[in-house]
Amino acid sequence: MIKLLFLICSILLLALLPASRTIPPEAWVTDNEEMDISKEIMIGETILKGLQDNDFRILKPLLKNGPMKSVVEKDFKSSEESMKQQFGELKSYSYLAELQTPMVRNLIWKVKFERKGSSGKMIGQEILFRLVSGSSDGKTVVLGFGFF
């Protein structure tokens, strides 16, 4: 499912590239300009909680206004199973940073997974999670998310 979501997100982001334009550096947000990202952080934390709890009902309302609105529970369950097989159980997550990018917001979390190795010993691993969001009609829209 994660691979499917990542593929969907990648395709959507690639589809948006031809329509993009170059934004001059002076239009970028600088460190001196504080922007409230609490809503996007809350959205990312909610998505991660939904993944951790294997609960699509938590994610569905967050996806309804964006390009991921066609994702259905069957796709979610498939991605969830793939994620568990590849990484194990999602144990914890912590917000790290927002990447400076024009037009969209890229927020990054550190996510810890645990799985049993072939020897039966527990293996911990950390992976980065990215939430890409934008704005449409004054509302925050989830454009994509995934692990890398």
Image (tube, rainbow, N blue to C red):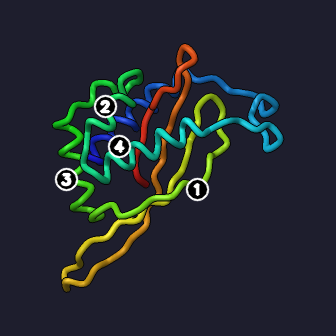
Q: Which of marks 3 and 1 is nearer the N terminus?
A: 3
Tell me which label, 2 or 3, sits earlier in the chain.
2
In the rendered image, the vertical position of residue 62 relative to residue 53, given as above or below: above
Kind of residue at badge 2: Lys
Amino acid at dot 4: Phe
Labels 4 and 2: the sequence-earlier one: 4
Read off the residue under disc 2: 60
Q: Which comes sooner in the sequence, label 2 or label 1?
A: 2
Between the residue at mark 4 and the residue at mark 3, the CA separation in whole angstroms equals: 14 Å
Under circle 2, the secondary element is: helix
At horizontal 79% and vertical 40% (from top left) the residue drawn is 30
21 or 9: which is nearer to us?
9
Q: Label 1, on which residue?
A: 96
Q: Residues within 10 Å of mark 4 (few under 14, many from 20)?
A: some
Q: Which residue is drawn at 41% across and 65% down?
A: 112
The numbered disc on residue 6 is 4
**Tag in front: 2 or 3:** 2
Alpha-carbon distance for marks 4 and 1?
A: 20 Å
Q: Residue 123 carries which label?
A: none
Q: In which quarter of the image is residue 78?
A: top left
The percent position of residue 117, horizontal first and vertical second, equals 23, 78
Instruction: Indicate the secondary structure of the residue bearing disc 3.
Output: helix
Residue at screen point 56% across, 41% down: 106
Task: Give the alpha-carbon distance from disc 2 to disc 1, as whole Å.
Answer: 24 Å
Q: Is residue 75 above or below residue 68?
A: below
Image quarter hosting the N terminus: top left
Left or right relative to 100: residue 107: left
Q: Which type of secondary structure does the marked residue at label 1 adopt?
A: strand
Mark drawn on residue 81? 3
Question: Where does the image place residue 33, in percent across and percent down from the top left?
Answer: 79, 37
Q: Which residue is drawn at 31% across and 49% down?
A: 51
Residue 70 quadrant: top left
